[in-house]
Image (cartoon, rainbow, N blue to C red):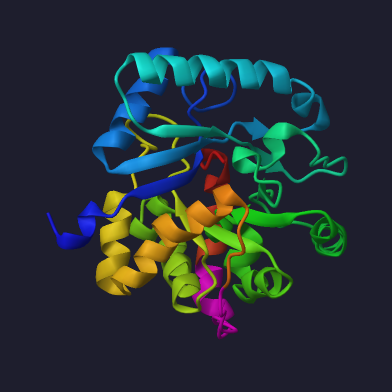
Amino acid sequence: MTAHSTIPLIDTHAHILPFWDDGADSWETALAMVKQAEEDGIVEAVCTPHILSKQEFQQESILLGRFEELSKRVKEAGLHVRLYMGSEIFIHPELDLQYRIATPAGNGRYFLVEFPMSLTPESVTQSFLNEIFKAKIPVIAHPERYLRILNNPTEAYRYVERGALLQLNAGSILGNFGQMIRELSHFLLDANLVHLVASDAHDVHSRPLRLRKAFDYVSHKWSEDKARQLFNENPAKMLRGDVIRSEPKPPQQKTKTKWGRYMKSFTKKMGTFNG
């Protein structure tokens, strides 16, 4: 093991709660995911069930009850990963952030938001930019997988410039979602547009609750300081509701030819990329 492998990791995006979305499908799977996280050096993780509408927010008590049950089972299993409750909120017109689960660990400052994988209409984007920042600070989940940003990477800078944070998926950095998403992830990292890296775990095998390999990769390709910031320091600040600072560099526009080659195949494959 390398020296930096002892740095504790914090995962702010994981679908651990069973029986809700396309994440854990049983208590056994959920516990296996937490065990996997502990073996990987993850010390804290946020449960982020998908919230697709206001109606699902209104089932908050069910989710909180399930979270308490999972926390109890984790303790009884002798596991030491500290779990927090949060959510991954799909952008929709009736977005209401007053619920307890709207912000991870009840931090009251940040919320994890997901956009459509396909091209988001400009009217939706503009409405989001104009209104949502008045309430809390959005952490945009896996921007490297959105067709709008793949088509025009400078869109990512547009969000960050307005105050949003960006959370990459660990698997995207490593190439698990394809070469173009890997390239865009590295492009955003080079431009200092990334604030957090999370697992976006859904199960034990295809979408595991692991971060260490991506942490080591970022340490080697960029720096250990950058890796520590993305996998430990900024996630801790997010949970506490502390200020997360960055110095983004306006990215150079990728040529339409380079990115355009991927657009048709990406559109066809979007159905295989669960949030």
Q: Is residue 252 left or right of residue 96?
A: left
At 71% from the left and 46% from the top, the residue drawn is: 108
Q: Tell me where residue 230 appears, x and y as whole percent.
A: 44, 61
Residue lying at the far left of the rendered structure: 1
Q: Tell me where residue 82 appears, x and y as whole percent.
A: 42, 33
Q: Which residues are magenta?
A: 246-261
Q: Is residue 200 left or right of residue 107?
A: left
Residue 21 showing in the rendered view: yes
Q: Residue 258: within the magenta? A: yes
Q: Relative to the observer, which residue lies in front, 260 or 44?
A: 44
Q: Please identify the quarter of the rendering in which residue 229 is found.
A: bottom left
Q: Tell me where residue 224 appears, x and y as whole percent.
A: 29, 69
Looking at the figure, which quarter contains the C terminus?
top right
| Position of 137 relative to 208 (above/below) | below
What secondary structure prevails in the magenta region?
loop
Q: Residue 235: within the magenta? A: no
Q: Relative to the observer, which residue lies in front, 233 or 180?
A: 233
Looking at the figure, which quarter contains the N terminus?
bottom left
At 55% from the left and 54% from the top, the residue drawn is: 142
Q: Relative to the observer, which residue lies in front, 268 or 150?
A: 150
The total of numbered circles placed on residues is 0
Q: Is residue 67 left or right of residue 227?
A: right
Q: Please identify the quarter of the rendering in which residue 249 is found.
A: bottom right
At 28% from the left and 63% from the top, the residue drawn is: 217
Residue 168 showing in the rendered view: no
